[in-house]
Image (cartoon, rainbow, N blue to C red):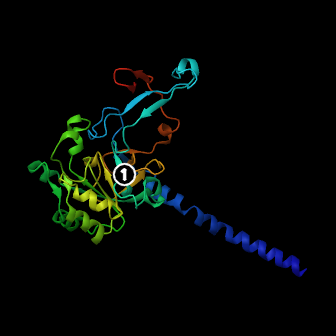
């Protein structure tokens, strides 16, 4: 009898605890339903294509239809039921990038060694658009950061800070890769952001941190174990304060660079971006024109 009573008591305790545990297990779903379901998403990465701007020292990349190693013939929708693509990428420093410190410093992590905690962070956008209009080679200064904080408050620890210059509005003009002077981030600003505000990483629109002869900003970052984002886009479409940024990248083993996907998560009433739509997102809508291989451009188009 005592054993039966004990088992019944344990069963009742387990039953009474179950709802609380279930509610606790789904609390992140509740956050999504109440806070994130209607947010606006803005893509902050360039589309990768063979003709986008890239440093001349890396050379061009190539797209081509993938084929059977036995026959050498490309797979086709009409005969094989599918198609695939072979990418010959000249570098991992292509398009919108996430630079791990191993890009310059082999004693620090490569792209596959970055922690999963890089996935989601507060997003800060500091504009230097007006300064760049007066000086195309203007670099973010500590005074610019302090002025931003005077308007919006202190930069959160662990945040991602993107510097808006509108340089990327000319993308994909190949001339961008040949510019000697372009907007940057000064070394004092980088040190302030990391050593005083303890941010996760910063990002900029050009393909280099600054236009100094020895790339002093990038050198300092990489040799001190910091990550940076390059080639960021569409910063004119996100708020300076209050958004989040989702970070995605392929984990190539030993990779010294990363093709990065940055997505800003903005408030529901933000005028830019797209909200989740169950009727549109799955299944995806059928296009009026099918994809086809364009031999002149060397990629698939509609």
Q: Which residue is mark 1?
A: 98
Give residue 139's quadrant in the image.
bottom left
Q: Circle 1: is it few (<14), some (14-19), or many (20+) Cα within 10 Å?
A: many
Q: Is residue 6 above or below residue 245?
A: below
Q: Nearest the camera: 178 or 95?
A: 178
Horizontal side of residue 251 vs 265, given as left or right: right
Q: Residue furthest bottom?
A: 2
Residue 18 horizontal/vertical position (percent): 68, 67
Residue in view at x 54 percent, y 63 percent: 27
Q: Residue furthest top?
A: 79
Q: Residue furthest right?
A: 1
Q: Nearest the camera: 174 or 18?
A: 174
Q: Secondary structure at mark 1?
A: strand
Image quadrant containing the N terminus: bottom right
Q: Residue furthest left?
A: 134
The reply to whether residue 1 is visible in this rendering is yes
Residue 254 horizontal/vertical position (percent): 46, 51
Residue in view at x 52 percent, y 25 percent: 67
Residue 131 horizontal/vertical position (percent): 12, 53
Image quadrant containing the C terminus: top left
Q: Nearest the camera: 20 or 293?
A: 293
Residue in view at x 27 percent, y 38 percent: 53
Q: How many marks overall? A: 1
The reply to whether residue 288 is visible in this rendering is no
Residue 88 horizontal/vertical position (percent): 41, 34
């Amino acid at each position: 009898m005592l054993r039966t009573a004990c088992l019944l008591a344990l069963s009742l305790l387990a039953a009474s605890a179950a709802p609380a545990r279930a509610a606790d297990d789904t609390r992140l779903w509740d956050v999504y339903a109440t806070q994130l379901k209607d947010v606006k998403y803005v893509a902050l990465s360039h589309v990768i294509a063979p003709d986008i701007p890239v440093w001349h020292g890396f050379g061009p990349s190539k797209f081509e239809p993938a084929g059977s190693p036995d026959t050498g013939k490309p797979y086709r929708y009409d005969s094989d039921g599918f198609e695939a693509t072979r990418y010959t990428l000249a570098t991992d420093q292509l398009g919108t990038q996430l630079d791990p410190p191993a890009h310059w410093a082999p004693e620090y992590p490569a792209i596959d060694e970055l922690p999963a905690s890089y996935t989601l962070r507060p997003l800060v956008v500091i504009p230097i658009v007006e300064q760049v209009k007066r000086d195309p080679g203007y670099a973010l200064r500590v005074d610019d950061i302090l002025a931003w904080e005077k308007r919006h408050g202190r930069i959160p620890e662990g945040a991602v800070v993107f510097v808006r210059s509108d340089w990327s509005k000319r993308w994909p003009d190949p001339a961008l890769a040949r510019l000697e002077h372009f907007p940057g981030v000064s070394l004092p600003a980088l040190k302030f952001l990391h050593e005083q505000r303890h941010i996760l990483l910063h990002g900029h629109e050009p393909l280099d941190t600054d236009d100094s002869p020895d790339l002093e900003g990038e050198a300092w970052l990489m040799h001190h174990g910091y990550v940076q984002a390059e080639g960021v886009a569409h910063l004119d479409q996100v708020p300076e304060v209050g958004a989040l940024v989702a970070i995605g990248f392929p984990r190539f083993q030993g990779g010294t660079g990363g093709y990065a996907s940055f997505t800003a998560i903005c408030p529901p009433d933000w005028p830019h971006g797209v909200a989740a739509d169950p009727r549109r997102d799955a299944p995806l809508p059928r296009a009026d024109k099918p994809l086809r291989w364009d031999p002149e451009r060397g990629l698939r188009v509609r």
